[in-house]
Amino acid sequence: MTSPGELERTLRSQLRGEVDFGAAARALTTMDASNYRRVPAGVVAPRDAGDVAAALRICADAGFPVVPRGGGTSIAGQATGVGVVLDLTRHMNALVSVDPVARTAVVQPGLVLDRLRDAVRPYGLAFGPDPSTHARCTLGGMIGNNACGAHSVAWGTTADNVTELAVTAYGGSSYRLGTGWAGAPEGLRELVAGNLAVLRTGLAGGFSRRISGYGGLDALLPERGVGVARAFCGSEGTLGVVTEAVVRLVEAPRAPVLAVLGYADESAAADAAAGLLGAGPLTVEGMARDLVPGAAAAGALPRGDAWLFVEMRDEGAARSLVRGADAAHSLLVTDPAGQRALWRIREDAAGTATRTPDGGMAWPGWEDCAVPPARLGAYLREFRALLAAHGLRGTPYGHFGEGCVHVRIDFDLVTPAGIARFRSFSGELADLVVSHGGSLSGEHGDGQARAELLPRMYGPEVIALFGAYKDVWDPAGGMNPGMLVRPARLDENLRFAVLPPGGGELSHGVARCVGVAKCRTTEVGGPGVMCPSYRATGEELHSTRGRARLLHEMLAGEVVTDGWRSREVAEALDLCLSCKGCRSDCPVGVDMAAYKAEFLHRHWSGRIRPPAHYLLGGLPRLLRTVALLRAAAPLNAAARRLPPPGLTRDRPLPPLARTPFTRWWRSRAGESRPQGPGATAVTLWPDTFTEYLSPHTGRAAVRVLEAAGLEVTVPRGPVCCGLTYVSTGRLDRARTVLRRTLTRLEGAPDRPVVVLEPSCAAALRTDLPALLPDDPRAHRLAAAVRTFAEALEQYAPHWRPPRLDRPVAGQTHCHQHAVLGDAADRRLRERAGLTGELSGGCCGLAGNFGFEPGHHAVSVACAREQLLPSLDAARDSGPAILADGFSCRTQIAQLSPYRAHHLAELLADGLPIEGPADSP
């Protein structure tokens, strides 16, 4: 038998694309977005169709199975495999051509759906199917799963929008499929001719969302036009590999209007959905209140506890629909931005639904059952009763207009008893779906999650026909075995089984990554941050999901075998900017910055660390020593000539201030503005950056806070949030520093703590109580932390900031976005007459990251994605450049002709001049 090593060598010698049988590549593809895990032998990224054919021939000769993989967002396990995984996203991701007259496009399988939509939008066209993962799912994956999305009410499934497919089978044979028998594999026509009765009766009575099994086989009937390409859709990689596709495009509505209809509960919304179809909607989506964050629902949605989102082609049609609907309350949204905000809530539900109200986790597995729309209300009521009977919880939502329900359920997939309940519930739910004339899968495919139960939906003759159909295409059984035909059990290969029991927060955190891959989006715009390193590199290794997968495999110990010393995990985490964007932007709140700190802590335990960990990780202590020696000037001069060892030579170090902030503060003792009786006293936190690198920011903040009527105090001794120690994984040192800080603050009265640097405020609010969970002082300090804008809004609500009346551009700090929020900042800017939006994304400097060797290119790429273009776009309006984070200001200064300011500085400049101005 051929060994994996021999197979790897053969593939390398005959393919132009990458061949990787290493631990990292295998670990990254053990899972998709399902509950399942299968370990591949290796990963191949073919360059073209010729590479695909060669790989399938070589693997067949060697007896290794093959599974094609796109974005890896399949939720039933069908994008995992035990043989060779074909990664079709790296090279075979082109939009080959667009014919706007014929309304068709030729695409490669690894093309992300949004790239196709962006390319055809100028022609007024769109690709009809649009699953919620449109920013990262691929056309090949959509064909494999017969994906649908919200607009299938109007435009159908992927199978309805494919006209031709180029397919390569296991062994290397290639076919061109369309309508008619030309190009079909040998034996297929004869199989259909011998099973006409089964096709006409066993697959009769279907509806638009019957996706399960090879449910499209009836397209091969002569009265259906012998749609060979259509029948291939939904085969989940079990028949062959699509190398090119011709897809239909539809005319995009020019000004669609969203009608949001409010109902008393989910069942009422479900009962109403089918009655709206006669109005010709583009989509009818349903969602209940418990999937909508309170802040998002407030003022944005009509009254009710459940809603239907109904998109119509124009405002007239939308108003007519509202008049004819039986909704208690309604809302018409014509503004595209408002529509996008509401659709974002719906798209995030795939992740939001993974959280139960008490913070527990819910899982896929019964994600997309579908019943005829007229049966949906009755089905949902029985479904809820079945959940209750098994002691399970889940919140349905989804494509109510087509009877397709998404739900994640809080299965216990770890203990034997929990897995047994998962199995018994699955069988009963399958029977319930079938009793309503439904399909076990309504758009995502069966994979391993449901294929075992297909005999409950189809009779034995149909199941036998499915097996024969598979054998015509794949007689050796090498294409994605264990899926659809002769399937694995639904309770085998569960991904949680390999994690060590009692693995702690890291184990729970990586298990929480369900793989929906929002971190893989490359969409530009909006406030989001995640995931800057993936955006810069395009490599799964450097996505949040990829890092979570590697950590999962490190804890499992099967693929990544060297535990906390793992080089693969260290490489993946090396380009993590610790931006914390995933903490807020990931639908399930994966916090990779925290996991990176824990890994670095353990990885370097007992060993000499890289110099940057000592220089940048120990920055507070180093800079305090420099200040005590009054050595800022000679150190600045030395750094200009030669950067310290262990840091990059690609960027200069920011200069140290000659007079630290607290020295200036002590020098003005007795000069503070006298405040009236009852003035609120606030403590201004002298963070390392304000203290030693940007003291003028602190001076400006003092001036503004005092002008607002607040009494400002500053801690007497040095204090530190521990941020630099956390970001370099020196967690024991961080705990020591934080305990010392808490002790120094014990003599100070309880008062709000104003922190000017967003990263330090975020560290005090989240890292401090996480590192010292048993110290009540830590929780008190965390609760006292306020940003500059929060302090002014909360403790000086009647103060009127100076009217600056000018546009602003710049950067919202990623930690502020992820941890602190910027609502108070927005309101303060508005009151000061500062107009315009700040850039989302990450500046790319990210504290120590941009100064470490090997990071400069990624650091610059992050800045060039959103920050720098936003500054250039605003240039003609003469904006004030705003960035509260010191890293953001430094990146702007080093990569652009602009100088950025903290909000405190802008406001201070607008105050009346009182005495000599302080120089920076």
Image: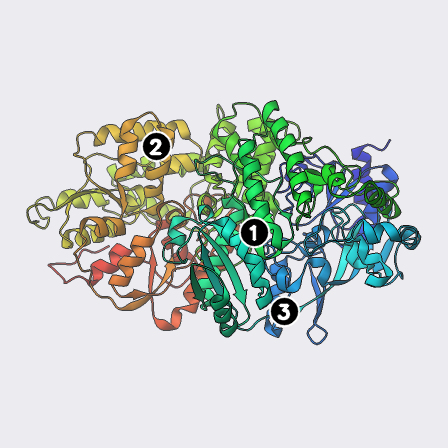
Which is nearer the eye, 459 or 908? 459
Looking at the rendered structure, the secondary structure element under dot 3 is helix
Looking at the rendered structure, the secondary structure element under dot 2 is helix
Residue at the extreme bottom of the image, as rendered: 101
Return the residue at label 3: 120
What's the mark number on residue 757?
Answer: none
Q: Residue 513: where, in percent of width, then height?
A: 55, 39
**What's the residue type where badge 1 is placed?**
Gly
Q: Nearer the viewer, mark 2 or mark 3?
A: 3
Return the residue at label 2: 769
Which is nearer the eye, 325 or 709? 325
- The C terminus lies in quadrant: bottom left
Query: CA separation, marks 1 and 3?
Result: 27 Å
Q: Residue 410: where, in percent of width, then height?
A: 54, 35
Q: Is residue 192 left or right of residue 733?
A: right
Q: Residue 691: where, in percent of width, then height?
A: 26, 44
Tell me if mark 1 has few (under 14), some (14-19) or many (20+) residues whose alpha carbon lies within 10 angstroms of its own.
many
**What's the residue type where badge 2 is placed?**
Pro
Q: How many marks?
A: 3
Query: CA separation, marks 2 and 1?
Result: 38 Å
Q: Residue 389 occupies which quadrant of the picture?
A: top right
Q: Nearer the viewer, mark 1 or mark 3?
A: 1
Looking at the rendered structure, the secondary structure element under dot 1 is strand
**Residue beneath the point at 70% across and 76% down:** 101
Query: CA separation, marks 2 and 3?
Result: 50 Å
Q: Examine the rendering and report whether any part of residue 39 can be seen.
A: yes
- The N terminus lies in quadrant: top right
What's the mark number on residue 398?
Answer: 1
Which is nearer the eye, 478 or 458? 458
Q: Earlier in the sequence, mark 2 or mark 3?
A: 3
Q: Earlier in the sequence, mark 1 or mark 3?
A: 3
**What's the residue type where badge 3 is placed?**
Val
